[in-house]
Amino acid sequence: MSPNAESTAFRSALEVIRAVEPRVADAIGAELADQRESLKLIASENYASPATLLAMGNWFSDKYAEGTIGRRFYAGCQNVDTVEALAAEHAKELFGAAHAYVQPHSGIDANLVAFWAILADRVESPALKKAQVRQVNELTEADWFALRRELGNQRMLGMSLDAGGHLTHGFRPNISGKMFDQRSYGTDPATGLVDYDQVRAAAREFKPLILVAGYSAYPRKVNFRIMREIADEVGATFMVDMAHFAGLVAGKVFTGDFDPVPHAHIVTTTTHKSLRGPRGGMVLCGPELADQVDRGCPMVLGGPLPHVMAAKAVALAEARRPDFADYASRIVDNAQALADGLLRRGAKLVTGGTDNHLVLIDVSGYGLTGRQAEQALLDSGIVTNRNAVPQDPNGAWYTSGIRIGTPALTTRGLGTAEMDATAELIHTVLSQTRPGESKAKYVLDPALADQVNKQASDLLAGFPLYPAVDLG
Ligand code: PLP
């Protein structure tokens, strides 16, 4: 590759865009500048490689390719077939999965594909067999209504939202909460850790069709071998949503009992968080569920996004390189250094630390709500997001927690020394912020915010983001 290839590619792209709508070109340039300047600690974000980003801006965006390879509803899909097969192949090799479905447009879509695959396998197919028909439209009215009642009355057991579970695991504001009768398991109030005995007791009593593991804000590993035993004991399908920690699985930081792929019947993920790919989703499974999963389009998805599948293939190829394993282990080293730095300075952390990519600070220890803390940190150039803590008295909007994660700063090259410096900046801001007259208001000396902003920029200056990209 020529030394200026990345700069030339992005500069030329912006020039072409600017000729049509300059404000879009300006916004794209401003986004890069903002990302370069901010200390990004959002646990679900990362920086995709230039190759991944460039794989998305091309003619694949124009192509319809409903169906799957060899069973398309549109003609002329030979090049889409190539990139879809490459992405699936890389995903299977990387994660050791028998089958990979790379079409989901996002994590929420991947979960919907998985839910419908399980419902079709466990409820719809037996109903069709019983009625001695092959398709739902061959059912009698009475059988169809009976099947619809049964499909809508299935049970799901997943991690509660305040313990770190995700909205798509059966919660009311999401379609999954309307599709399933949901119950959740929490964490041990004393340790903040998943209590497998409690999960087992809940599963025995509730008898879910689907047992879901996976999280957005739980700072520890989950033992998937034990979860699978629980699922088997009650006859549930075991699904793991590894959206947050897929990069740690890919990088072989989570192995054995902590690798979901050998233990789960079906695994879903996003591709843009710790995995560092384009925004999107993916489903992995064994041969038993493969056919149902491949019906994701048209069951719950429209046409796939071939440009994003091309970018998935690029990012998954990157994740198969040896340096990705090094990256994944540095993510965890950095999260642990950040946690240690915060603990040493007196912060209260949910579970007392971390063994993955994220840390959850209970900011009630600073007398603040999550909302106040999030804004005060943002004023100081530190980008985080507020998050509920277990049994949160401030609910899901104001919250009592700040979730921080290290995948993005680790991509940038920051290491454990810089994490300690980051802990100092976070602690300085939180300990100097005073709560205001409402749960959203706060008082922070603007001079202190400016000083921390400057320290954050100094910290980042040694770790340029996209160093080979110069927009001029
Ligand atoms: N699953 C988990 C565990 C997540 O954390 C998220 C996103 O935050 C999703 C699914 C949904 O992903 P997306 O935003 O791509 O739909």
Image: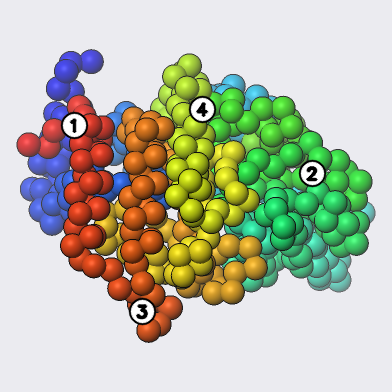
Residue under pointer 2: 227
Query: Which residue is identified by label 1?
Result: 469
Q: Earlier in the sequence, mark 4 or mark 2?
A: 2
Q: Amino acid under label 3?
A: Gly
x, y percent for residue 281: 52, 44
Element type where label 1 sits in the image: loop
**Snapshot colouring:** rainbow
Please name which of the two marks, 3 or 1, marks the residue nearer to the observer.
3
Answer yes or no: is residue 123 visible.
no
At numbered mark 3, what does the secondary structure look like: helix, strand or loop? loop
- Mark 4 vs mark 3, CA separation in Å: 40 Å
Q: Is residue 135 above or below residue 178?
A: above
Mark 3 or 1, nearer chain start: 3
Q: Earlier in the sequence, mark 3 or mark 2?
A: 2
Specify the quadrant of the image occupied by residue 416: top left
Question: Which label lies toward us, 3 or 2?
Answer: 3
Residue 56: give its label.
none
- Tell me if 263 is positioned left or right of 33 in this view: right
Q: Earlier in the sequence, mark 4 or mark 1?
A: 4
Q: Which residue is mark 4?
A: 329
Q: Position of residue 322 (x, y in %)?
A: 48, 16
The local crowd at label 4, few if under 14, some if 14 to 19, many if 20 or more residues have their Cα within 10 Å, is some
Circle number at residue 436: 3
Residue type at mark 2: give it.
Met
Dot 4: element: helix
Task: State which quarter of the image contains the N terminus.
Answer: top left
Give the crowd class for mark 1: few <14, some 14-19, many >=20 residues within 10 Å.
Answer: some
Report if residue 199 is visible in the image: yes
Mark 3 residue CB less than 8 A from any atom of ligand 1: no
